[in-house]
Amino acid sequence: MHGEYKVPGGKLVIADFEVENGKLARVSINGDFFLEPPEALGKISASLEGADIGEDEGELARRVRDSLGENVEMVGFDAESVAAAVGRGLS
Amino acid sequence: MSESKFAEFRPRWKEYEWRVIRGEKVAPPVNHALDEVFAKRAGSGESPPSLRVWDRYEPEVPFGRFQSPGNEVDAENAEKYGVALVRRMTGGGAMFVEPENIITYSITAPINFVSGMGAVESYEFLDEWVVGALRSIGVEAYYEPINDISSSGGKIGGSAQARSFGAVLHHTTMSYEMDARKMLEVLRIGKEKVSDKAVESAEKRVGPIKRQTRMPKEEVISALLATFAEYAGGNVRTDIVSEEEMDEAEKLVESRYGTREWNEMIP
């Protein structure tokens, strides 16, 4: 699956993933956004691994938010836009 | 000089002695490795901060640290045109670079240089002098947050930043000229075959510097450096990349910027 979400006034968030037994698998969140520290992206993608395809975007965004440490800075995107990209991929 | 949006921060340019380097031509990954070398040295205080203008032997698509190359580049066409694909250490988007058509520069400074500024603010702060320089040569340039330099004639370029190794690295790539058809063949902006209409629309969206001033590229670079020197209050020293820095960069090409693991990984 492939979903893209352009943040208004921000950057493009892309979600590439597969669906296995109704759950997200091999999730890659990618795009032209900025993120410090860069290692935080692995945590963002991992937080969506195993998410049920029935979860709404609010729940997906919560997963992303909970994966972020205190000093993570997302520029041009946020947890909601990551969830929106996944949502586009599912629809 | 026009009044600054960054009156509070503007004097910081004068607090350092800057190395200003007009780089020699190198293979595409070497420039990326040099950015890391310069960031580390500026962060540790081993070297003063710097402004380095890039030059290259070959065309390349530098793409953002968080991008998946398969989503951004048509690998077959890139190979056909001999375009190197290199992942940057910074975020942001993919650009199509033919050496003679592009001006790229990097600024590396200790992280204190941008302290008290949010990321979005620091992008504009670090490119303010360029916008000023372009205006001084008759290009009606302006900054378009988060990270674009635009103009009345279309988008000119984009920047990317990383805050790592105790330093800020800020690099900007601007179009001096462009081959819109080739760009659309190499970058996956649309998936369909490149149409005349798509080429026309890209030509409208992008406003290469040469379309807006008759100045040759080398003179544009000299004008940029002159404005930079003004911002720095004259505290600039013309320099070259040292042998030691080049050796360190070559090692980083072998371990990172020239490897498939780094360039082809899916984030």
Image: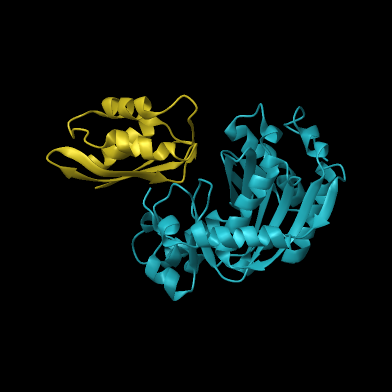
Chain colours: A yellow, B cyan
Percent position (x, y) of residue B173?
Answer: 61, 54
Q: Nearer the viewer, residue B261 or B121?
A: B261
Percent position (x, y) of residue B83?
Answer: 49, 69
**Quadrant of residue A13 in the image?**
top left
Q: Is residue A48 above or below residue B56?
A: above
Residue at (68%, 46%) from the top-left corner?
A: B41
Residue at (35%, 67%) from the top-left corner?
A: B193
Total labels: the figure holds 0
Percent position (x, y) of residue B97?
Answer: 56, 63
Asked if residue B260 lies left or right of residue B123, the reply is: left
Residue at (68%, 63%) from the top-left corner?
A: B210
Q: Nearer the viewer, residue B72 or B29?
A: B29
> Farthest right residue?
B234
Residue at (53%, 54%) from the top-left corner?
A: B205
**Quadrant of residue A3 in the image?**
top left
Asked if residue B98 lies left or right of residue A19, the reply is: right
**Quadrant of residue B264 in the image?**
bottom left
> Farthest left residue?
A21
Percent position (x, y) of residue B203?
Answer: 53, 61
Q: Can residue B137 be seen?
A: no
Asked if residue B154 lies left or right of residue B220, the reply is: left
